[in-house]
Image (cartoon, rainbow, N blue to C red):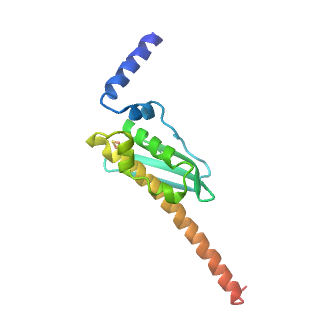
């Protein structure tokens, strides 16, 4: 019974993945970085044109993305694209990660079908939003610190 079930699942996967590149199949079958990070440094949730959403959690140490996870209610292509985007961003500086483009995802997967190109966009936009949120948090902290210093310089207590 289990063997039959496994065979059915395998056959189904082959039908679903027909026409996709090897890179896509591998990522689809073993997606990375799915999950949440409890005390992340930044988080973003973006909903795409199709109504599906991706959430991303970032941990940033010394300007580099030391950990990254995502959750999605989207399609298999969304999981696959978000897996690739998070895998690519992990270990990179935030400036380098901001250079990841939907076209890079599309290229790596040797061309996503038209109806799934927006999944790559959604994954990249979510990463960008999470990084930008982190940068704006950092800027606010720096401005507050500057304000404190200038108050001290002017003798305020
Ligand atoms: S993100 Fe909606 S179909 Fe993939």
Q: Where is residue 16 in the image (x, y as percent from the top left)?
A: 33, 28
Query: Where 54 sits versus 30, above or below?
Result: below
Is any part of residue 46 visible from this angle?
A: no
The front one of 86 and 12 is: 86
User: What is the residue that sits farthest to the top in this orientation?
Assistant: 1
Number of numbered labels in the structure image: 0
Q: Position of residue 34 (x, y in %)?
A: 51, 40
Q: Image quadrant for the C terminus?
A: bottom right
Res. 76 image quadrant: top left
User: What is the residue that sits farthest to the bottom in this orientation?
Assistant: 154
Residue found at x 28% / y 39%: 113
The front one of 68 and 105 is: 105
Q: Where is residue 155 in the image (x, y as percent from the top left)?
A: 72, 89
Res. 11 image quadrant: top left
Residue found at x 45% / y 46%: 85
Where in the image, quadrant-wise, is ligand 1 located?
Answer: top left
Side of 138 relative to 83 (left or right):
right
Residue found at x 35% / y 33%: 21
Q: Image quadrant for the N terminus?
A: top left
Is any part of residue 60 visible from this angle?
A: yes
Query: Where 86 sits versus 13, above or below?
Result: below
Side of 123 relative to 90 (left or right):
left
Q: Position of residue 128 (x, y in %)?
A: 45, 57
User: What is the residue that sits farthest to the left in this orientation?
Assistant: 114
């Amino acid at each position: 019974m289990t063997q039959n079930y496994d065979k059915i699942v395998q056959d189904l996967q082959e039908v679903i993945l027909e026409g996709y590149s090897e890179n896509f199949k591998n990522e689809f079958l073993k997606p990375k970085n799915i999950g949440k990070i409890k005390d992340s440094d930044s988080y973003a949730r973006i909903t795409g044109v199709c109504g599906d959403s991706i959430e991303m959690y970032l941990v940033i140490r010394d300007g580099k993305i030391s950990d990254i996870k995502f959750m999605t209610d989207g399609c298999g292509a969304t999981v696959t694209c978000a897996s690739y985007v998070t895998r690519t961003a992990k270990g990179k500086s935030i400036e380098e990660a901001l250079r990841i483009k939907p076209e890079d995802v599309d290229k790596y997967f040797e061309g996503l079908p038209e109806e799934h190109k927006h999944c790559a966009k959604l994954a990249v936009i979510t990463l960008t939003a999470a990084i930008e949120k982190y940068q704006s948090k950092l800027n606010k902290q720096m401005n507050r610190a500057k304000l404190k210093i200038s108050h001290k310089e002017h003798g305020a207590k």
